Amino acid sequence: MKKCCYPGSFDPITNGHVEIAIRASKLFDKVVILVADNSQKRYTFTLEERVGMVKETFKDYKNIEVCSTDSLVIEKAKQMGCMCLVRGLRAISDYEYEFSVNATNTFINNEIDTIYFMASTKYSFLSSSTVKELYKFNQDISTLVPKCVLDTWKNKKD
Ligand code: ADP
């Protein structure tokens, strides 16, 4: 079985992430979306909320699973039997970041390669941070995120 791992913060998941996961699901037998929890990062949503939103988004997709880790992504991917990682590229700035992440990952394990999907033009401007900024200033983000993200935000206390 050809299994890949799509890691990220998903804080929160956006339609840009959704598109990449669906494209990957057409090429692999299984896509595991790996929600990373890094103690050095400050998230808007808790790990439970981030995982919950991703699970809800893909509940009807049989070959997309959701998992989380507070450890090294590349090690978790190996443990889960994934043959490669999937990442998305929007702009040159993503390339620079991904270049160093990939170098680190291959230093740890050079058997698991990373495959990059170019963002669609429609979502090339879209990031979790953009969505958070727009939400903060009361803009309509309903075409940018799955509905469950809006629901989670509305029910959030703080
Ligand atoms: P991280 O904190 O690990 O960068 P993100 O959740 O921000 O996690 O992103 C996970 C992956 O999804 C990254 O490879 C990122 O480049 C990609 N990505 C994010 N938004 C988009 C988008 N609109 N189109 C394509 N790829 C995207």
Image (tube, grey):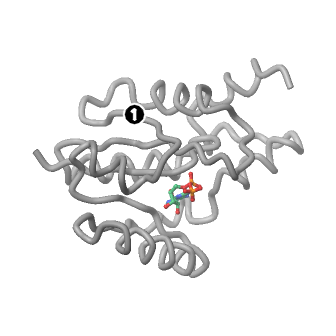
Vertical position of residue 56 compared to residue 54: above or below = above
Q: Would residue 143 appear left or right of 136 to someone viewing this image? A: left
Q: Quadrant of the C terminus?
A: top right
Q: Amino acid at mark 1?
A: Val
From the top left corner, tell me how far across and down residue 94 is, in percent. Answer: 56, 73
| Number of marks | 1
Residue under the image location 63 percent in, 31 percent down: 149
Q: Would residue 148 appear left or right of 117 to someone viewing this image? A: right
From the top left corner, tell me how far across and down residue 3 is, in percent. Answer: 21, 48
From the top left corner, tell me how far across and down residue 67 is, in percent. Answer: 41, 34
Residue under the image location 39 percent in, 51 percent down: 6
**Element marked by disc 1:** strand
Q: Nearer the viewer, residue 81 or 117?
A: 81
Seen as rendered, the residue at the extreme right is: 137
Label 1 crowding class (10 Å Cα cut-off): few <14, some 14-19, many 20+?
some
Residue under the image location 62 percent in, 45 percent down: 144
Residue under the image location 42 percent in, 73 percent down: 102
Q: Quadrant of the N terminus?
A: top left
| Residue of label 1 | 66
Vertical position of residue 105 compared to residue 43: above or below = below
Q: Nearer the viewer, residue 73 or 147?
A: 73
Vertical position of residue 87 compared to residue 97: above or below = above
